[in-house]
Image (cartoon, coloured by chain):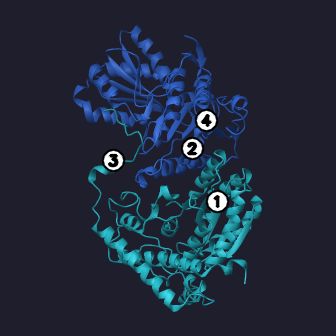
Amino acid sequence: MSEIRKISESRLRELYKRLLMVRRFEEKVDELFRKGKIYGTVHVSVGQEAVAVGVAEALRADDLVIATHRGHGHCLMRGADPRLMMAELLGKATGLCGGKGGSMHIVDAKRGMLGAMGIVGEGMPIAAGVGLALKMQKREQVCVCFFGDNASNGGPFHESLNVSALWKLPVVFVCENNLYGLSVPLKKTSAVEDIAVQAKAYDIPGIVVDGMDVLAVYDEARKAVRRARRGKGPSLLECKTYRFLGHSRGDPAYGPYRSKEELVAWKKRDPLLVINKDGRLSPEDVKEVEKEVSEMIEQAVRYAEKSPEPDAGTVLEDIYVQERCSPS
Amino acid sequence: MREIKYAEALREALAEEMRRDERVFVFGEDVELGYAFTVCKGLIDEFGPERVFDTPICEQTIVGVAVGSSMMGMRPVPEIQFCDLLPLCMDQICNQAAKLRYMSGGQVSFPLVVRSPAGRWGGFAAQHSQTLDAWFMNVPGLKVAVPATPYDAKGLLKAAIRDEDPVLFIERKLLYQIPGPVPEEEYIVSFGEARTHREGSDLTIVAIGRMVGIALEASEVLEREGVTATVLDPRTLIPLDKKAILESVTKTHRAVIVEEGPKTGGVGGEIAALIAEEVLDSLDAPIRRIAALDAPIPFNSALEDSVFPNAHRVVEVVRDLMSF
């Protein structure tokens, strides 16, 4: 057993709880979307929770995160209030972004969740910029940038790894490799199987980790974070994971582009099972955690549903800091 | 008043703002040596390589780095060497810098200034001579400045750096070496305030960037013919000083708009529509737009000449307008 497996039972219970928080939150989001209570679209990360939770475990409270359009878990793991998040997803005035961002753009800047980017790969140059500011300001914080596997095929991935490595920026690039970019399998879009090998081109560490195992993710993330915090520069951490639901808009988990057998095989490696493969958490523990989390999610939904719609007048607010834009 | 060149005025603005605020820094391709248009030349001597530094050639990430660092409280002023390269970083300018504040409900802001030269340079052909101002007028959340004189270049750049919002600062290549009066003492030119270069009673010429000089040249010819023109420069396209434009047209009853970019979908179309929507009744003649031809900018100098507006074309259009 590696060192990391020896974490205390209370910590293990806490990690289990966090995995479950993301899981139940997103299952509820999916349910609300299907009921027509959430407008637009949603991208849930059911199945991928170990990445958000494991990386968050390696961070300090003042560290920073740039997330993807599938960013609910990253936001929750920064400590965002689930009630305010759910209100945002329902487009309510009380939502984190006042109903202007929604699922794809969930932000909680006070808690270091700087932005969820709706455009694939575009958070990466921004994370490099956050890293540059941290370095210039001589702060000891680290910025984590999450991105999906298909983002690695775009220019910003390479440009951002290059400048971050060149300038030794305190950034950790975390690839959530769930094997599909929308409906297209990675083998059809990427010339390499392991995205992490591309780190070699920028002379930085590239690590492949089991993204279904929260402790394994935590273990590698903390090394990368430590390296960044010591001024040694960025790392590329590739977490092999899988989404148990469809890409978005409630599309099916299997069918047109991936098989039921593949899904079933990955579900055997559900992060909620993997974390307790040694049976250190008792069935009673699990039951208790389930109850705590369910209550939290129900509260969030109640709060969000009771919250008011945004005032129409807010539509022209927050465009500029200095609002005086039209003198006429 | 002393006279300095447009490029020097910009350099003074950068240096003064860097002295005033240690969060301000400049970076981009060849900024350490001050290529290609000398604006950043020498800044590294005073401010050092931490605040003046070269980047790889990766425009998208140059602006992305500005987005991220501005969000963290820095005041980045990246240079994009030719505005023709702005399309490479359009996502970071238009989707990120201009939108993330709104989408976050005001939680984050982006006090960055992207500087970039536009327009004719002479024989640089279709990928290094464009004027893309109009592309960026269509982006709520962004501010766009286009200075026409050394005075405005300095005052507007200082205002842009102090602005809390993202600014696209579009300069003009052929203006860099043109001198003009610039006070030695500190001043700021506020965004959203047009400048009236001369007042006349027969028509209003709204001119952008390098076209201000051409409009002034044309108005001197016209004056000898007994036609007096008001020449108005909005100086910033977002925010646009609609009030100044409408008030002037209401007084003169005729309007011409001159810009260096192509006519279709151009800045002139927006200003013409504004005038038509608001003060149509006060017009004595149709609104006229003078712009570059809807062609890529050709290499050959005679062909290039024929694409861009010049004072002669302005005079001809105004003569026609005065016949109504």
Query: Badge 3 is on which residue?
Result: A316
Tell which tag, 2 or 3, sits nearer the viewer: 3
Question: In whole angstroms, how far apart are the C-alphas of marks 1 and 2?
Answer: 19 Å
* Residue in the image at 72% along x and 78% along y: A3
State if disc 3 and disc 2 touch (CB < 8 Å). Answer: no
- Mark 1 = which residue? A157
Numbered circle sitting on residue B22: 4
Measured as percent of width and height from the top left, residue B172 is found at: 56, 29
Q: Measured from the top left, where is residue B150 in percent x and y?
A: 55, 21
Asked if the residue under mark 4 is in contact with the one under mark 3, i.e. CB atoms within 8 Å, the reply is no
Label 4 marks which chain's residue? B
Is circle 3 on the same chain as circle 1? yes
Distance from disc 3 to disc 1, alpha carbons, whole Å, reads 34 Å
| 3 or 1: tag closer to the N-terminus | 1
> Could you tell whether B251 is left or right of B93 in the image?
left
Determine the residue located farthest toward the left in the rendered image: B281
Comparing labels 3 and 1, the label whose residue is closer to the camera: 3
Q: Amino acid at mark 4?
A: Glu
Q: Out of A41 and A14, give the one closest to the viewer.
A: A14
Look at label 3 and name its amino acid.
Leu
Q: Residues within 10 Å of mark 2 (few under 14, many from 20)?
A: many
